[in-house]
Image: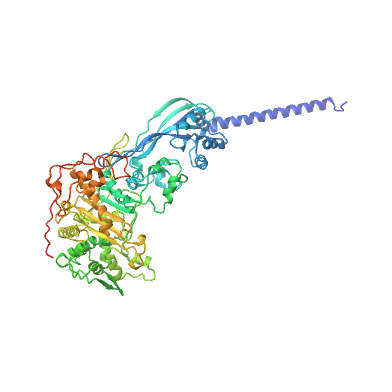
Amino acid sequence: MSKNSPKEGSMDFEARVTLIQYLVLAVFLMLGIRFYFLQVARHEEYKIRAENNRIRDIPLIAPRGAILDRNGKVLVDNTPAFNIVIYPEDMPPNKEETIAVLVNALGVEREEAEREINNPLRSKSDPILVKQKATDADLAWIAAHQEEHPEIAFETQPQRVYLYGKIACHVLGYIGQISPKQLENPKYEEMGYKTGDIIGQGGLEAYYDKLLRGVNGKRQVVVDSHGRLIRELKRIEPIKGQDLVTTLDIDIQKVAEEQFESKGDTGAAIALDPRNGEILAMASYPNFDPNVFARNVISSENRKEITAILLDPKHPLNNKAIQGFYPAGSTWKIMMSTAAIEAGITPLNNSRLVCGGGLQVGGRFIHCMGNHGAPDVHTALVRSCDGYYYRLGVKMGLDVMKEWLSKFGMGQKTGIDLPHESMGSVPSATWKARVNPSSPEWTDFDSALSGVGQGAVAIPPIQLIRAESGIMMGGMIHTPHFLKEAKATELATVINYEDKSTDLHLSPDTAAAIRYAAWGVVNEGGTGGGIGFPKELNVGGKTGTAQVISKDKAVGKKLQDHSWFISFAPLGKEVTPEIAVVAITENGGFGAKASGPKVKMIHLAYFSKKFGRALAPEFQALVDPNAAAQGATPTSQNGATGGATNSRKPALPKTTAGIGAAQPAAKPLLSAGATTQATHLPVLDNRRRNP
């Protein structure tokens, strides 16, 4: 029996009641604080979250603008493809479950799936692309397992297609996902790029990415708590990017690339219009297929095709026309002659210098290929007299040489509308100190070598053709470019390329003399005389043989001289050209032997298309071997073509036989709509001028 009094029992009961009351009060106080936190303090946040659980925005990827050649032929376009995506909001807490399904059921590589899904920089609401070009089996599996895996879906998205495969790959470029390093660049942040965006990564695709990429649309849909689609509320269609019309002529481009591929040579070639800087063709070999990057856009590290391109020791991604730099060899002499005449060092009425079979300078004797007596500038260019230009380099000296090379744009970017252009190197005291710190002073020996495009000279082909085309045009140097027009869209107005030019104000007499000498290289028994250009074209130019290493050490093809040829047509004292072509064949030897024939075929492609007839049997054989024996227009040794007097012109080829890399194969190499009314080219006065 309890010893506690009734009073003590009553007090104990009251204490328990009071404790319970406080506990209840504390619970309600905690609930009140929580309700205030949820409904007042963070009301907007949770309202948005709740709304997102009900309404979802699904992006509609805008197709990139097409890229066309100057005649309207589509070079790059888009095709619809089914891609597999993941919705992060519907992912189960255990991501491994989703990853296992992607790997085992849908054929996604595990490393790839983990990288894409676990990327901390990705938006929590945007779908994640995990597989391109899903198969019918993939689509069937996703449809059958929508209840179990609402986070996995397929969407129709544009797939980039390069219709001609490898042709013009360095010009057109390729696409890929934006990299973390690129996202660190403020330029990309300002343009609104984010993780997962597909952008241009090379060529015109990269340079004009802002114009090409368009504006994404979206679908606003209602989904249930499991992420299943209930209905669509709103749809905003994407706006395609601007179509780019380029200056390229795909027919000429095919011929340029075939010249390297068929011979297994490496190097580069450029054809441009010196009147405005429009580039008709730009080839770099070896090349690559940009479709490889387009179909593997989410896995640049793992796909075997991409890895093979990236690790290829021949570096096919490098555009040698703007990124490779080489000793210019004797092609340099056009600039040296122009500068010396304009600077008054070798005026036209007193331009003779001794050849002497070479020059003794700095304790060394550097040889000329012959002994040309005391030639004037015309003969020196035609015969490519090294002895003349050794002495000219010494007479000019470093300061005059630097002044004029700067005017010509040597060692500077040309401003071409492609990324990653190289500047190369030109004669300077800085260069000498860097490459030879034990003897850093500039010497006459350095000037002599620079006079023939060796030593300190290493430039990309684009610089050479820009400058020397300008000389042929009387000093008017245009910026080389590919853009003709960006077509208008709903949000963008049409954009036309605005020509940028520099006028060197060359003396008309100087320009006429240089043009005549370049014409003589081909037509007066000069170093380009054996190439065999049709006489009616009045082609002029300059050969170049650039030494890679001293002759006594040059063992094996990789150490042989580089072969250059630069040319212009038509050309005369008073005739400025409409096309300029340059080619460099790496380790090809003599310029007229390796690069000359390549340049010749590019000229034949241009003028055959212009005149509507094949100008030489070898060109007819290239574009249509079956018709070559029957329809080629013979070119006589003295320059008259059979077509000049015969009213019956051979039909243009119907197939691309002989151009194995060109796609699509059914299209003719030369357009059927090519100009058929041949204009008469100017005939140059063939008489030798007085020195």
Residue, x 31% and y 71% (percent of image)? 443
Give the number of callouts.
Answer: 0
Is 136 drawn above or below residue 335 in the view shown?
Answer: above
From the image, which quarter does the C terminus lie in? bottom left
- In the image, residue 323 lies at what x, y percent? 34, 54
In depth, the one of 257 and 62 nearer the eye is: 257
- In the image, residue 346 lies at what x, y percent? 19, 66
Is 212 drawn above or below residue 282 in the view shown?
Answer: above
In this view, which residue lies farthest toward the right? 1
- In the image, residue 2 lies at what x, y percent? 86, 27
In depth, the one of 338 and 193 nearer the eye is: 338
Is 84 drawn above or below residue 431 in the view shown?
Answer: above
Is 602 drawn above or below residue 392 in the view shown?
Answer: above
In depth, the one of 107 and 630 nearer the eye is: 630
From the image, which quarter does the N terminus lie in? top right
Residue, x 22% and y 63% (percent of image)? 384
Question: In this view of the protein, can residue 351 be seen by the observer?
Answer: yes
Question: In this view of the protein, can residue 605 be seen by the observer?
Answer: no
In this view, which residue lies farthest toward the front? 629
Q: How is the image coloured?
A: rainbow
Classify residue 215 by image quadrant.
top left
- In the image, residue 373 lies at what x, y percent? 19, 70
Task: Judge from the rendering whether residue 503 lies leftward or rightward of residue 211; answer left or right.
Answer: left
Classify residue 666 by image quadrant.
top left
In this view, which residue lies farthest toward the bottom? 363
Residue, x 31% and y 43% (percent of image)? 662
